[in-house]
Amino acid sequence: MTTEAPILPSFNKPGKRISIVLAIAVHLLLAGFLFYGVRWQTKATDVVEVELVRAAPEPAPVAPPAPLVEPAPAPKPLPEPSPPPAKPDIAIKEKEKPKPLPKVEPKPRVDRFQEQLKREDEQVTQRRNLENAEREVSQKQAAQASAARNKAVADYLGRIKGKIRGNMVLPPEIKGNPETVFELTQLPSGEILTVRLKRSSGNATLDAAIERAILKSSPLPKAEPADLFSRLVELRYRPLDD
């Protein structure tokens, strides 16, 4: 028995071609299943003719390919639960007792009058200390100035005595080293105006020799500095002193 092949319509689209191929493959599988099934049931018959007339099914519409979809992000793992707090070894601890607050001593009452008196006493004491310090400085400066002046006067008189000694002609047979005091009157230039004996040495010859030496020494050395000049000069003279 001859099985007529179904007349398949011609399609140009690739999708329809695939559908036709699938339909043919399905029919072939179905034919093979029926063939082997009938042969297994009836072994006596050597030839079994099966006529299959079946219209070709219309090709199923091919769905368009699904668009690519990015996979959803994996869910974030949930945070692990924190472990329960460890139980203390002892059941309950006794609460610490609050520390006692420091005792605040009350401030002594301020007596404004006494405070003012104390402040004034301190001011008076400071003023006295300052005055004493200034007085000590002034006295020290005055003492230094006086010592410097005395030294300058001594040097000035020493220069006068030196010039007079250079003009001295001592008489013979002078006993001891008697002192003679003369008072001189001079000009700023050093010229001697007068010579007066204030105290004798006890030796008239010595006194006259000293007076002559004083007159020969005119003009006397000038005072240096000039404020040391004095119109009256007291001169103490010992013949054997250097």
Image (tube, helix red, strand yellow):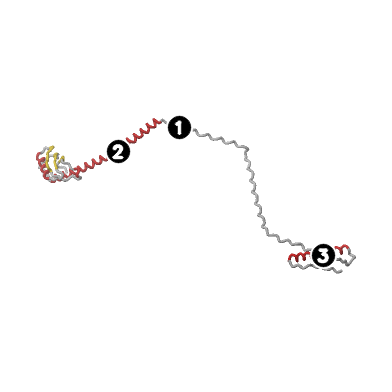
Q: Nearer the viewer, residue 150 or 38?
A: 38
Q: Which residue is mark 2?
A: 134
Q: Nearer the viewer, residue 9 or 107?
A: 9
Q: Amino acid at mark 1?
A: Lys
* Label 3 environment density (alpha carbons within 10 Å; few <14, some 14–19, many ≥20): few
Q: Amino acid at mark 3?
A: Ala
Q: In x, y percent, where is residue 82?
A: 63, 46
Q: Tag 1, which secondary structure?
A: loop
Distance from the alpha carbon under mark 1 to that under mark 2: 41 Å
Residue furthest bottom as drawn? 2
Residue 176 badge: none
Distance from the alpha carbon under mark 2 to that under mark 3: 146 Å
Quadrant for the C terminus in the image = top left
Q: Is residue 19 above or below residue 121?
A: below
Residue in the image at 84% along x and 68% along y: 4
Is any atom of residue 156 visible in this view?
yes
Q: In x, y percent, where is residue 67?
A: 69, 60
Q: Which residue is mark 3?
A: 55
